[in-house]
Image (cartoon, rainbow, N blue to C red):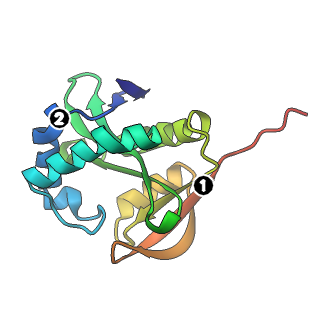
Amino acid sequence: MNVIETERTLLREFNLADVEKMEEMYSDINVMRYIGAGTVLNNEQTKKLLEYWINEYYKKFGYGMWGVECRQTKKLIGQCGFNNLPGNAGIEIAYLLNQQSWNKGLATEISSETLKYGFEKLGFNTVFALCYPQNIASINVLNKIGMIPEGHRTFYGVDFLFYRKDRQITSTI
């Protein structure tokens, strides 16, 4: 099921046929360097993670990480979506793309539409983002989509830059 469509991508729920393609990304240290604790995942870990999204997370919350598919090639090129931060710290937007998809504006495209979906369709009032301080590309994406830096926070044993964006309430007066 497609959840979000952008000009160049489709964001959809993962399925188990995605394990091999996601393992390629999750096992690439360059892709995973700035994701979570910065470690790679093997096939078994990838399968367990996708099963968790598919069998639990989507059903429990109505959102999660979605696969990002190139509209033109129909190939899986990454993921984007929402996580619940540990300790009830809020909803996080997160994304990753395979290396072939870097530096093309895709991260901005998918995260912008995902953020809009979170506010308009899921009713989120505030969305957060975590970013490694040395991840300049992601800092640029977060700035482009209107996220505001709010200092540093530690999650998963890592010191992250902490960003936030609040839903814009428009007056009908």
Residue 156 image offset from top left, x and y in percent: 34, 72
Name the kind of residue labelled 1 in the image. Answer: Lys
Residue 29 image offset from top left, x and y in percent: 15, 61
- Camera-near label (2 vs 1) is 2
Q: Residue at x 34, y 23 (%)?
A: 1
Q: Residue at x 22, y 32 (%)?
A: 15
Whether residue 102 is visible to the viewer of this picture, yes or no, is no
Whether residue 3 is visible to the viewer of this picture, yes or no, is yes
Determine whether 44 is above or below 148 in the image. Answer: above
Determine whether 172 is above or below 83 in the image. Answer: above
Residue 132 sits in which quadrant? bottom left
Q: Residue at x 36, y 58 (%)?
A: 137
Which of 148 and 154 lies nearest the eye of the viewer? 154
Asked if the residues shown at circle 2 and circle 1 are in contact, with their CB atoms under 8 angstroms apart, the answer is no
**Please, what secondary structure does the residue beneath circle 2 have?**
helix
What crowding class fits label 1: few (fewer than 14 Cα within 10 Å), some (14-19), or many (20 or more)? Answer: some
Q: Residue at x 52, y 56 (%)?
A: 143
Tell me the tag on residue 165. Answer: 1
Query: Which quarter of the image is occupied by the C terminus?
Result: top right
Residue 69 image offset from top left, x and y in percent: 27, 31
Name the kind of residue labelled 2 in the image. Answer: Leu
Q: Residue furthest right?
A: 173
**Please, what secondary structure does the residue beneath circle 1 have?**
strand
Tell me the tag on residue 16. Answer: 2
